[in-house]
Amino acid sequence: MELLGTIDPTLPLVVVAVDLEAKELQTSLPILITGVGKIASGHAVLATLGPLAPTQRPAMVLNMGTAGALIDGISGTHLIGRVLQHDLDGLAIEALVGHNPTPDLMLGDGPTLATGDRFIATESERRALAQRAQLVDMEGYAVARAAMALGVEVALVKHVSDNANEAASLTWAQSVTACSHHLGTWLAGQGY
């Protein structure tokens, strides 16, 4: 976990998993690098923003990063409309204890992002998950849930890096710098 810059309550806080995703952003906004996965990203947001008074927290949390495409033909940069957690069966837990610990989070219009702590890299996993979402990552749900718990507005912006299949790890490594550039272009287009 590393915070680059100073949190400003009038500006967004950009949140990325790894420094490679921030490399080409070309922004003066503060950037929080969380580490990979739900635990690291959720913890980083809560540990960084939780101790701050509500008036000192950023105007919003802007989670930017890469995502795998679960459906052929999806590419580019996307503002996420809904995010779900795919590797914890919230409905089964709800049947046991009376509440779902992982409800889908509605963020607006746009594709659905599935978040989990598994790197989706087989065609069978991809097909199964594609019935619930169009994109997949490893941090978005946790970042959104942590920001919401603190009362901070949140948006998720993901650039497709791979097709969440057998070639995904190689494709991600080859495309992450270009993805960061595309995310930086999107961010500049928002006036940041």
Image: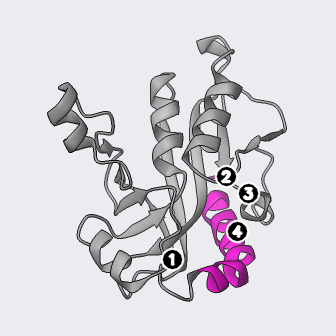
Q: Nearer the viewer, mark 1 or mark 3?
A: 3
- Amino acid type indicated by mark 1: Gly
Which residue in the protein does label 4 denote?
Answer: 180
Label the magenta part by its dominant secondary structure. helix
Outermost residue toward the right in this view? 5
Residue 18: which disc?
Answer: 3
Q: Are marks 1 and 3 in contact (CB under 8 Å)?
A: no
Q: What SS does tag 1 mark?
A: loop
Point out which mark residue 16 bears: 2
Query: Which residue shows up at 45% across the image and 29% down it?
Result: 148
Percent across and percent down for residue 15 are 65, 46
Can residue 9 be seen here? The reply is no
In primary-sequence order, the first of circles 1 and 3 is 3
Q: Amino acid at mark 4?
A: Ser
Cβ–Cβ under 8 Å for marks 3 and 2: yes
Q: Is residue 117 left or right of residue 191?
A: left
Q: Is residue 17 left or right of residue 151?
A: right
Q: Is residue 6 magenta?
A: no
Query: For residue 114, which numbered disc appears in the image?
Result: none
Q: Using the numbered discs, state the Cα–Cα distance from disc 4 to disc 2 in whole angstroms.
A: 10 Å
x, y (%) of residue 68? 49, 73
- What is the CA distance from the residue labelled 1 to the residue labelled 2? 17 Å
Which residues are the magenta region?
169-192
Relative depth, front residue between 26 and 84: 84
* Residue designated by label 1: 76
Q: Earlier in the sequence, mark 1 or mark 4?
A: 1
| Residue at 57% from the left image edge and 37% from the top image edge | 42
